[in-house]
Amino acid sequence: MTYKIIRFDGKDDELTAQSFDKYSDAYDLLEKLYGDLCCSDADYGDITYYDIVENNLKNINGE
């Protein structure tokens, strides 16, 4: 099973173009990029929100 990162706004970027063999690999990448943000540092209007999901291509392509 593979995993992918998706954006909450449905757009694509360099993170959503990747796939990961393990959930932890995707999580580690997001942690590396955004883990040092503190709530007091954040301007919530400028943050892109991401989620990690199973990359189930069979369901997407209707196979």
Image (cartoon, rainbow, N blue to C red):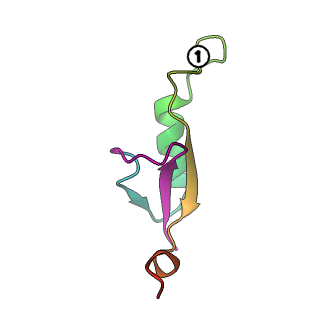
Write down the quadrant of residue 49 in the picture: top right
In the picture shown, does residue 38 fall above or below 7? above
Instruction: State the image coordinates of residue 14 (x, y, percent, origin top left).
Output: 33, 45
Magenta stretch bounds? 1-14
In the picture shown, does residue 40 fall above or below 8? above
Instruction: State the image coordinates of residue 37 (x, y, percent, origin top left).
Output: 57, 21
Q: Is residue 55 magenta?
A: no
Q: Residue at x 47, y 43 (%)?
A: 29
Q: Residue at x 52, y 26 (%)?
A: 47
Closer-to-camera residue (1/6): 6
Q: Secondary structure at mark 1?
A: loop
Instruction: State the image coordinates of residue 9 (x, y, percent, origin top left).
Output: 51, 42
Closer-to-camera residue (10/32): 10
Q: Amino acid at mark 1?
A: Ala
Instruction: State the image coordinates of residue 45 (x, y, percent, origin top left).
Output: 55, 21
Q: Report whether 62 appears left or right of 35.
A: left
Q: Is residue 9 magenta?
A: yes
Sort mark 1 into few (<14), some (14-19) or many (20+) by Cα contacts within 10 Å. Answer: few
Does the magenta stretch mainly form a helix, a strand or a loop?
Answer: loop
In the displayed orientation, state which residue is furthest to the right: 39
Q: Report whether 59 appears left or right of 15.
A: right
Q: Residue at x 59, y 21 (%)?
A: 44
Number of marks present in the image shown = 1
Q: Which residue is mark 1?
A: 42
Q: Report whether 61 appears left or right of 37.
A: left
In the displayed orientation, state which residue is furthest to the bottom: 63
In the displayed orientation, state which residue is furthest to the top: 40
Closer-to-camera residue (29/52): 52
